[in-house]
Image: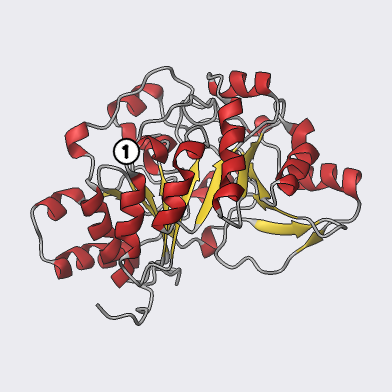
Amino acid sequence: MENRAPVATQDMFGRPLKNLRLSVTDRCNLRCRYCMPEPEYVWLPREDILSFEEMATLAGYFADLGVDKVRLTGGEPLLRWDLARLVRLLLQNRRITEVALTTNGVLLAEYAQELYDAGLNRVTVSLDTLRPERFRRLTGRDEFARVLEGIESVGKTGFTNLKIDTVAMRGFNEDELSPLIEFARHYQAEVRFIEYMDVGGANEWRMDKVLSQDMILDALARRYGRITALPERGAAPAQRFCLPDGTIFGIIPSTTTPFCAQCDRSRVTADGLWYLCLYARSGVDLRKPLRMNEHPEHMRDIIRSGWTARRDRGAEERKALERVGLRDGGLIEIDRLREDPHLEMHARGG
């Protein structure tokens, strides 16, 4: 296989195909209210779930067209047995320069060492509160202590560049912004505050629940003083900022300031549906041609043609609904979500 990186395929707006979010399962061991608030869901049929070899093969086709970073997601990816084996399979392709993981941290302490040994490059842990009682109320589970243990295991194992993702919600955790920054500082991590997004339908999203980037910056400036925006963003979802003492944090303002114009991400679900946008209502079936043993060039053609025709700007379209007063409506109905489990965020990797 050639080691030279291919020129990334570009979509209709010149956005390169560079980042792939690969969901390994739709199952999760938490029930966070902004993602999976229902007690039970219609799960993807187990026979449809891709094997690790199938996932690595698909990732290879994407790498041939420009993808060099793969992020493993879920559901909760650590529920998939022997995930380190998938990491090793992905890194056999030298065009893939980074394999990262986003996890809720509950099982991280158990698997951190073997993931590090397999070559996993980076870990992001989702943590929305430092208060055990709030954690239980948000997630429906009493697993806060295990998440902390997982975060502690990251540094002990040898990982660097730990990130902590926090969904910022008015009426829930707006009083924990500075404690979360201090918590991240303690673990030599970088916290990224994510605006509450209107994806899916079961999460009862409303605009008045969104803690916006401006609100976050105002609150932190009152606590720390002058905050400086760092210039380098590019296609990264987070705008990064620096506190007066040099501490860096990020904000992902997808709801109020969409970054669709720079988005180079797409998502493959655990059963092989390819979504070109987090907000997309339909995806491209890659499982069927893969299991029919279609020629690799035909598989690449499917991906190439899908990306070159890509016009998705889902977050901007949702933002535009504010002008006509429709943003708090128009989410996907619960019955429709039960008919097609791919439409909820936990099935497509968030």
Foreground: 100 or 11? 100
Scheme of colours in the image: secondary structure
Amino acid type for the residue under numbered disc 1: Trp
Mark count: 1
The residue shown at (67%, 51%) is 189
Q: Please name the residue shown 61% across and 44% down the image.
A: 165
Q: Quadrant of the N terminus?
A: bottom left
Q: Position of residue 115 (x, y in %)?
A: 43, 50
Above or below for 35 versus 84: above
The residue tagged 1 is: 81
Res 322 visible: no
Residue 206 location in percent, x, y?
A: 60, 30
Q: Quadrant location of residue 303?
A: bottom left
Residue 103 % position (x, y)? 49, 41
**Which residue lies at the image location 41% right of the left edge and 39% below the top edge?**
78
Q: Nearer the viewer, residue 180 or 202?
A: 180
Callout 1 environment at 10 Å: few (<14), some (14 to 19), or many (20+)? few
User: Can residue 210 be seen here?
Assistant: yes
Which element is circle 1 on?
loop
> Measured from the top left, where is residue 80 in percent x and y?
33, 38
Is the residue 312 above or below the residue 209 in the image?
below
